Structure formats: structure tokens, C-alpha cells
Image: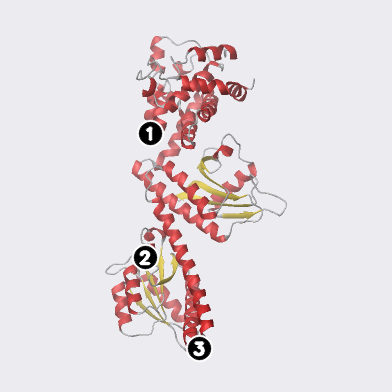
Amino acid sequence: MMNNDTQITILVVDDEEGILEITEEYFVRKGYEVFTASNGKEAMAVIDTGIDIGCCFTDINMPVMDGLELAERIRKKDASLPVVVMTGFPSLDNSIQTLKNGVVDYLIKPVNLEQMELCLRRILRERGLFVENLLLKEEVQRQERIKALNEELTAKIDEVNLLNKIMDDFSSFNASFDIFNHVVALSLEVSKADDVCFYIYSESGDLLFPMACSNLEQRRGENMPRPLKTMLLTTMAEDIPLLVGATEDQTIFYGARSFMATPLRIRDKVFGIVTASISGSETHFTEKDIFLLNFISHKAASAIENTALYENIYDNLFSTLYAFVAALEARDPYTQQHSRRVTEVSVMIGKEVGCTDEELDVLQFAGHLHDIGKIGIRDDILLKPGRLNGEEYEKIKEHPVIGADIVSQLGLWTKEQEIIRNHHEFYNGKGYPRGARGDEIPRLARILSVADAFDAMASDRAYRKKMSKEKVMNIIKQESGKQFDPEAVAAFLKISDKAWDGCHGE
């Protein structure tokens, strides 16, 4: 372990007494001399005695003097004394950029003692080589070794700065949807992947929803291959990051030759999973890539949890939402298929009018939930086989407000609430519940209104059979500028054949 029977002295600084005791006992057994301190001030007192310390391991968050200040003071007193930081992810926020001053490595808590010793041996070996270079080697050899050391330290600093960037980037978001998109963008940048996707998990039916993807067009309307779904569900259940590669003449999923996935958990509960893939035949993910993807997922989980706590929705968000949906579908099976078709047509119209990816995602979510307010309508009205009378119709008109209020109570985003609340408003102001007109009605609600009316007319209802395609199209054209936004109608007419065939199989 040590050359020439020279006993190496190390200094361990941590405000947790148990960690100091365990670390001291381990390294003493290994033959090291160990000094301990509970904060930076005590550590400097040890160093000021003139003891020849080979390496200092320090925590960051400590009373009196923290690890960052200690590292800076050590650097000013003796720049040759290596300092290793031991810390957990949360304590690194907005501070890690300063660690390069006097810090040669960092270890993530909980620290494995064997890993700690390996780190120590490497540092002492590098320090010894450095001293040997200075004293014994020729100038050329010395320069080469110093260059190699500088490159290693530069790489370490780059890695530290990358981790710092990951942490800092999440600090500015206050909406979950923005976090989902940022996970995808950041993962693409860090891993050099060709495709990244963030899936939200629902225990109800073991469902995975693509909330944000770099190749969102491919994911929309596409059923996930069963082997991929099984693999992702297993990865989430085992809570272990996954890294796989394809054989030379095969691909994995979506044409990928290298694939990785890391689960995202919040309060020990599975929230979702992030996947990344490379389609190129020559490039493959490494263990460093999966480490960084996992690090991004951890930071995203923390940011999502903070956002959820701020909105006061996390504990019952998805469970309550899907409970409502399941209850509604159990009462009125038509609603499930209707909402699915309305969503598909809404997205088609949205693409035609040039909606952004974010707007299309909002349509996806709101489309499936636009009739959730019917959970508050009595069965004798909701399931009535004949036409509604005036009083019953007034009651059914309450469902947009009920639906928006349900979503509001769950703390979901404002855009989805507004679509649900306004999807029965008419362009000419004669709709409900507010009688809003024109641009007073959110654009996405005007789009969904056309898709909703189209499917209602083109589907069998409890009180009538579906209308013919010709009749449906004539009504929609006639209501342009009246019930419907002319822009949405014009876009719908361009995709009407595809909408009819795709949603109704005719």
C-alpha cells in the first residue's frame, strides 16, 4: 500500500461523527495515520501544526467553516496538498464551479470506503509522480507529465462544469412541462444522442405517455413496441439504469444501435423514464453517458417535485386524474372513444395551422380530458337515450366548467384548463358557458371545438345514428364564422378525408 514503509497521513473533515469514526477505523486498519475534524476551522488548526498531510477529504456543508472555504484556504496555504470533496447532489447547487480551486476530485455520498481508498491511492500516486517529475526527470519528460496531468485536471474540471450546468439549468423552471422539454434538450446535448424521449408512467394499465420527445412526430399516434415497453417497465421496477447495444447487423428499437434508459422516481414512487438512442452504426453510448443521463434524471426529479410541491398537486395528481377518467369511462364507454378521436383530429388540425410542438402536446392532453366534467352530470341525463329537455340541456352545459375546475384543483397548467372550459364556446358568441366570441376564445379551444363537433356528428349517439360524411362536411362549412373559427374550419377541410377514414374507418 505504501512505499518505503512511510506512513501516509490523511485528514478527514465531516460534521457527522459517525462518518468520521467509520472512516478513521477503516484507514487506520489499512495502515494510514488519520486526523479528523468536524468543520473547516478545526481542519485548518490541524494543518497549521505543520503535520505532513498527504490528502484531505472534506464534506461541503458544515458549520463554522464549510468545505468550499476550507479548500480555498488550503490552496492559499499549500497548493500541493490535494483536497477531495465528498458530497451529495443537493449540496452542489450553484457552488460546484468554485471547486476547481484546490480540489482535485469529488466523491458522491454515500461514499464507499473502498472507492475512497482507491481515490486516495490514485491521488497519492499522481502526486508522487508530479514530485518525481519536478525533481528527477529531464525537462522534456517533466513537461510531458505536467501536460498529461493538466489534461486530466482539465477534463475533471470540464466534467464538474458540466454537472454544474445540469444543476443550474433546472433552477429557472417553474412549470413541469418546461422541465420535461429541458430534460430532452439537455440529454441530447450531453449524450450526443439522435433521439431522446421523456415518458410519464401511469400505474393504471402500466401506461407510458411520451410527454416530451426530440422526435415527437414519430411518437404521436404510434404504439410502443411491446418488447420496448416490457424492457422499460422492468427497468423502472428494478430502478437500475439500462444500457444496451445492438449486434452488428441488427437494431434495437426505432432503428437504434445503442440505447439507454434511466428511471425517474419522486419520493420513492416511479414517475417516468428517460430514454436515449443512437442510430449511427459507429457511435455507442458509454458508462459516462448513462451516468450523465441518470444525473439529469435525478435533477429533473428534484425540480419536478419542487414544482409539484409549489402547486400542491403531487400527492394525488395522476392517481386522482385517472380515477376520474376511469370512473367516467365506466359510466359512458362512448366518452373514451370520442375523446381519443377528438384528440387525434385536433392534433391533425393543429399541425395544419402550424401549431408548435408545445401546443400540440397541450391539445393531446386536453383532448383526452375535454369531457372529464361529465363526471359531475347525473346518469339519467348523461346516458339518456332520447333528446334532452331544456332543463337537462342546461345541466349538461355545465360540464366544461366542471371539467376545468377538476383540472384546476389538481394544479394542472392553465392552457389545458382554458381549452376544457371553452371548447363549447361559439365563434359568434352564442356558445357556452361564457358566451365568448372570436379571439376571446383560446385558439386551441377553437381548434378542439371543430374536432369535437365533427366527431359528435359523425358518430353514433344514444339518441341518434351518425350523419353521412356529406352532411357533416356541409354543416361544418355552413357554421364557419358562426359556430366555428374560419381558420380552424379551413384547416379541417384539408384533412377531413384523413380524419374521417382514420377515426371512423370508412
Q: Is residue 382 left or right of residue 469?
A: left
Foreground mark, 3 or 2, reads 3
Kindly state the secondary structure of the residue where label 3 is placed.
Answer: loop
Where, by quadrant of the figure, is residue 496 drawn? top right
- The quarter of the picture where the C terminus appears is top right
Q: Which residue is mark 3?
A: 136
Q: Position of residue 446 (x, y in %)?
A: 44, 23
Please tell me how crowded label 2 is: few (under 14), some (14-19), or many (20+) other residues with Cα within 10 Å.
some
Q: Residue furthest left?
A: 64
**Looking at the image, residue 154 lies above or below residue 498:** below
Q: Nearer the viewer, residue 316 or 261?
A: 261
Instruction: Say what amino acid the circle numbered 3 marks.
Output: Leu
Q: How is the image coloured?
A: secondary structure
Q: Which residue is mark 1?
A: 414
Q: Residues within 10 Å of mark 1 (few under 14, many from 20)?
A: few
Instruction: Identify the residue shown where x is 48% and y is 29%.
Output: 367
